[in-house]
Image (cartoon, rainbow, N blue to C red):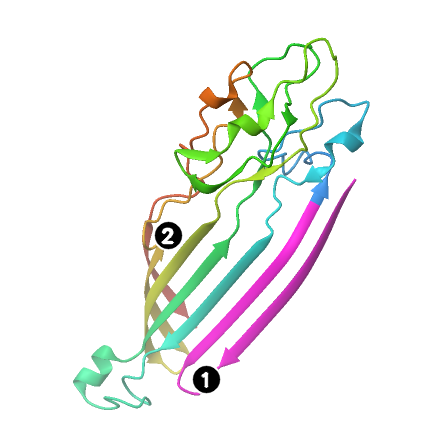
Amino acid sequence: MSNFHSFQAKMTKRFSSGLQFLGSYTWSKSLDYSGSAASGSGWVGGPQTITNFAAAYGPSGFDVRHRFVGSWVYELPFGPGRRFLSSGILGNIVGGWEIDGIGTVSTGRPFTVYLSSSNNNATEWPDRIASGTRADAQRSNWYDPTAFVQPPAGSYRYGNEGRGSLYSPGWTNFDLSAAKNFTILENLKVQFRVDAFNTFNHPQFGNPNQTVNSKNPALSDTSITNTITDNRDLQLALKIQF
């Protein structure tokens, strides 16, 4: 069982000067008992026990609360039919260029904290005695491990931590392109473009170490040592339209 609720908004604007902009925003929440076979459970894992799915009801592994995506196309005002350098050799050289881009800003995804060992042979999930979030969260120390403790010895019960109780860092990414359009014949056009994915080569960090020291949570490593996107990629392309 799963459910998804969201608020979505979109804005499109086309200017007469060759500028187009599309912005979309989604505020959402996705809940389930476990990830599907196709999408997986992400960093939240599955239920602790098949006899009590309700105890595992929480954020989906792909749950993202806030996400904004903006894209734009700007045809530079140079060359034939444009405001500047509408004639001459220089106008033909600098004309026909457009700048495209996509920017994405997103909050992080949920993760579950686990114990390194268990007294009860019944669970690897801890009891949550505080929020676990840190106002001064850094990649070297993302959450407060002392908020997660081992259930009392001999209690033989599952930890009360909720599935997906904490969230990883958000991320920001920009993809940019520059394209030159040539008109060969009335019905034959050629476009040369340069695309840069993750243009600013900004690392997008993933989830922290999810396991806390069962005996002494304060000694736990809660650092983030992984990224979830590729480094900057560049590609050249030539496209013929007819």
Residue 147, how many percent across, how many down?
57, 29
Is residue 29 in sight in this rendering? yes
Q: Quadrant of the C terminus?
A: bottom left
Task: Identify the disc placed on residue 197.
Answer: none
Looking at the rendered image, the quarter that the N terminus falls into is top right
Q: Looking at the picture, which amino acid does disc 1 mark?
A: Phe
Is residue 11 on the magenta stretch?
yes
Closest to the observer: 127 or 206?
127
The quadrant holding residue 230 is top left
Main secondary structure type of the part rendered in magenta: strand
Question: Which quadrant would residue 229 be assigned to in this image?
Answer: top left
- Across the whole image, how many numbered discs are drawn on residues? 2
Residue drawn 36% across and 61% down? 176
Residue at point 57%, 55% (across, down): 66
Q: Is residue 138 above or below residue 234?
A: above
Tell me whether circle 1 and circle 2 mark residues in contact (CB < 8 Å): no
Report x, y in % for residue 63.
62, 45
Q: Which residues are magenta?
A: 1-30
Q: Position of residue 181 (x, y in %)?
A: 33, 74
Return the residue at label 2. Answer: 198
Whether residue 210 can be seen here = no
Q: Is residue 156 above or below residue 133?
A: above
User: For the point 65% across and 54% down, which residue is it?
Assistant: 28
Mark 1 and mark 2: Cα distance apart in space = 27 Å
Q: Helix or strand or loop: what does disc 2 sit on?
A: loop
| Dot 2 amino acid type | Asn
Percent across and percent down for residue 30 are 69, 47
Horizontal side, residue 220 vs residue 202: left or right = right
Q: Quadrant of residue 178?
A: bottom left
Return the residue nearer the eye: 43 or 238: 43
Judged from this view, the residue extending furthest toward the left is 89
Q: Which residue is mark 1?
A: 15
